[in-house]
Amino acid sequence: MVMDHEKQRARYVAGTEGAPPVPPPGGYRNARRQSGAVTPPQYGAPAPAATATATASEAKKPANALGWIALVVGILFALILLITLAVGATDTLYGVTMLALQLVVVAVIIGTLFTARGRTLAAVALGITLVFNVATVGGIGALQTSASGSYDGMKSEEQKHEEAYPGIKGTDPQDALQQQSLEEVRSEADGLFAEIRERITAEYGYEWVQVGDEDLRPERNGYGGESMLVEYTSIGWATTEPIQDYSTKLDVMATIDSVVAEHGLPPLYSFNGEFSGIDPTMIAKLYGSEDPREQHTWEYYTDNYPDPMRLYANIYDLSNDPTGDFLKTREAQNARTGEPLEGLQMVVIASAVLSEDDQAEFEEKLKDYPGFQ
């Protein structure tokens, strides 16, 4: 019996090397178990300081009046700069008054940055001032002035007077009064186009489509301003079908040549032809080849000098574009204007023309410019 107890005891203590004995299977008799979750003790956690509570309380306080003043001042200064830019007073942006005002604004903002309750609003005001200041807004104004050429603040009265010259420097203003008016050019172009379209359709069966709209671009007067003259670009016309046969191209141009002759214009001049006077290498570069049979573009021209009207008649032929480079050019043009990729196209351009409605005013203004041209 004693041996049994010794064996049982040895089972618990064998190999423990001095450690407390493990409990018997099933645990000790009448042992109590702790109910609920056991929360491990926390060591080293500091007790909340009274200063932390005070800091949180201070953080919840609203910004002081100085912070709002800095923000409002920054916004008002930005608005002043933008309004000055909008009215075109570029010189004012670099004036002593504006620079002094900017220094005051910066001083207010920087001073507010050192206050705990105004620091946030001051930072916002500083950001606004960094974006809208004399340097940035003044730079935008300088670029705008450079693009438009309006340096009014730096021009003398003589320069401003020259800028308003109604004619074009280097040309006799009487030429604009003696040559065809804008309305006469438009009327002649419309009549010329109508007859050419009718003849081409009757003889070759080609139909037509309008390309683009009429465009009037003011001509510069050579003194930094705009003259009263305009460059006229007519509505364009194009055939809806390609013209690729060499003989047909020659016949079509001959038909146009006969029509312009009936209108008193000189014969068509071929820029792409061998007798154009252009270097053959340049012809190949511009039109795809020196040989008209292999060219992707034929360009013909005539005018009614000394009147300003110029007629251009071009034939585009993509069958003579082995590399596909010219096709890309035509596709880009088609995307801009909607014109057909191939076929015959015509347009009239007239430079430095004066509208009949402006002739009286033009002559009146010329009285202030004796000897100008």
Image (tube, grey):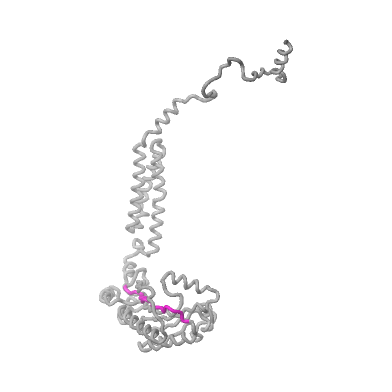
Q: Indicate the quadrant where residue 367 lies.
A: bottom left
Q: Position of residue 211 (x, y in %)?
A: 39, 75
Q: Is residue 295 above or below residue 76?
A: below
Magenta highlight: main SS: strand
In this view, which residue lies farthest toward the top? 2
Q: Quadrant of the C terminus?
A: bottom left
Task: Look at the image and tell me whether residue 305 can be seen.
Answer: no
Task: Look at the image and tell me whether residue 198 can be seen.
Answer: yes
Q: Is residue 331 above or below residue 43?
A: below
Question: 316 or 291, which is in the foreground?
Answer: 316
Highlighted range, magenta: 228-243
Q: Position of residue 370 (x, y in %)?
A: 30, 76
Q: Position of residue 173 (x, y in %)?
A: 32, 78
The number of callouts visible is 0
Question: 61 or 226, which is in the foreground?
Answer: 61
Looking at the image, which residue is at 53% across and 73% down? Answer: 324
In reply to whether residue 241 is colored magenta, the answer given is yes
In reply to whether residue 54 is colored magenta, the answer given is no
Q: Indicate the quadrant where residue 364 lies.
A: bottom left
Question: 336 or 290, which is in the foreground?
Answer: 336
Q: Quadrant of the N terminus?
A: top right
Looking at the image, which residue is at 34% across and 67% down? Answer: 159
Q: Is residue 59 above or below residue 203?
A: above
